[in-house]
Image (spheres, rainbow, N blue to C red):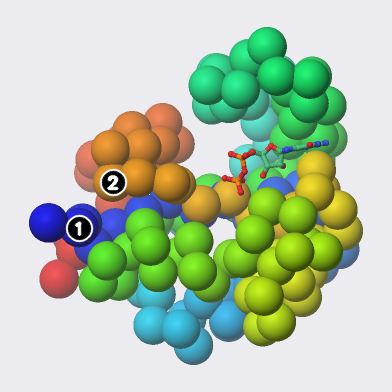
Amino acid sequence: MAGNTTLTIIKPDAFGNAKTGKIIALLEERGFRILASRVMHMSKDQAGEFYAVHKGRPFYPELVEFMTSGPCMPMVLEKDDAVAALRGAIGATDPAEAAPGTVRKLYAESKGRNAIHASDSDENAVRESRFFFAETEILAAR
Ligand code: GDP
């Protein structure tokens, strides 16, 4: 059964472009509820570990550089079938291919600087939520 929580990160490009409020508003309008949130500036070690699955890919150094270039905003979100719902709301990795009305179509600059992260499975949603938040910092899901 699909879980009802997922992890998102408003990335440094959107944070720097002052789009955090618009992105949160879009997500709330789509029915997501915020269970945890924080503003932080990731270290190289943190970003490297978070994206360890991409180690060895050509874009990995650029990805770590970008994710540590400014503040970001991780959030745990709740909604029925949260992982699939959020992937739908953010759109394709490359904003040029993202559907109209998605976060990336509206706010991303490029395939690398693409405004937002979303977990791609329930297993990763749990792992990624615990990467940023202690259990006591996450509101109980309904
Ligand atoms: P996502 O699940 O849609 O975020 O995409 P992936 O898991 O495939 O990639 C993770 C992140 O790495 C993306 O959101 C981008 O920020 C970055 N990325 C992926 N592909 C590229 C690429 O070809 N070039 C650059 N610069 N960054 C990329």
User: Residue at 43% of width from left, 46% of height from top?
Assistant: 120
- What is the tally of numbered marks visible in this picture? 2
> How many residues crowd around disc 2 within 10 Å: few (fewer than 14), some, or many (20 or more)?
many
Task: Residue 93 in the image: state x and y as whole percent.
Answer: 68, 52
Q: On the image, which quarter does residue 69 sit in?
A: top right
Residue at numbered disc 2: 122
- Of 92 and 67, which appears nearest the observer? 92
Q: On the image, which quarter does residue 126 sit in?
A: top left
User: Residue at 55% of width from left, 18% of height from top?
Assistant: 52
Task: Residue 136 in the image: state x and y as whole percent.
Answer: 23, 44
Residue 21: in sight, yes or no? no
> How many residues crowd around disc 1 within 10 Å: few (fewer than 14), some, or many (20 or more)?
few
Q: Quadrant of the N terminus?
A: bottom left
User: Residue at 45% of width from left, 47% of height from top?
Assistant: 119
Residue 13: in sight, yes or no? yes
Of helix, strand and loop, which one carries label 1?
loop
